[in-house]
Amino acid sequence: MTDTKRGYPWIFWPLVALWNLMAFVLKFTGRLVGSIVGLVLMIAGIGLCFTIVGLPVGIPLALFGGALMLRSLF
């Protein structure tokens, strides 16, 4: 049921992969640039949310930007 190396259930693999991707981005860009990129992605995602057509892309983009900002803080 769980991954023997990490100790998390297999159902959380997409979240763990996303967290590792954000860690990879922050490793190369640094914390300040990572938080600025996260802020820009969040603003772009919220801007897309104002259009109905861009809503399916805007919500994940805003969430990814917020998670990137959160990851750059901790």
Image (cartoon, rainbow, N blue to C red):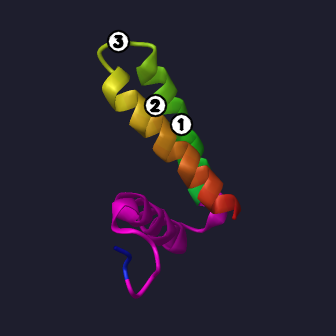
Which type of secondary structure does the marked residue at label 2 adopt? Answer: helix
Relative to 55, say whether 61 is above or below. Answer: below
Residue for point 55% across, 50% down: 67
Is disc 2 in contact with disc 1, using a CB cutoff of under 8 Å? yes
- Relative to 72, say whether 48 is above or below: above
In the picture, the disc for residue 42 is: 1
Q: In terms of secondary structure, what is the magenta stretch mainly?
A: helix
Q: Which residues are magenta?
A: 4-33
Q: Position of residue 48 (x, y in %)?
A: 41, 22
The 10 Å Cα crowd at callout 1, few under 14, some 14 to 19, many 20 or more, is many
Residue designated by label 3: 52
Q: Nearer the viewer, residue 21 or 39?
A: 21
Q: CA–CA distance between discs 2 and 1?
A: 5 Å
Which circle marks residue 61 in the picture? none
Residue 38 point in image, percent of width and height: 55, 47
Q: Is residue 16 left or right of residue 70?
A: left
The quarter holding residue 10 reads: bottom left
In 3D space, how far apart are the residues under numbered discs 2 and 3 (Cα atoms)? 12 Å
Task: Using the image, determine if residue 2 lies above or below residue 50.
Answer: below
Q: Secondary structure at mark 1?
A: helix
The residue most toward the front is 1
Q: Which disc number belongs to residue 45?
A: 2
* Quadrant in which the N terminus appears: bottom left
Q: CA distance from mark 1 to mark 3?
A: 17 Å
Viewport quadrant of the C terminus: bottom right
- With 8 as the anchor, is 42 left or right in this view? right
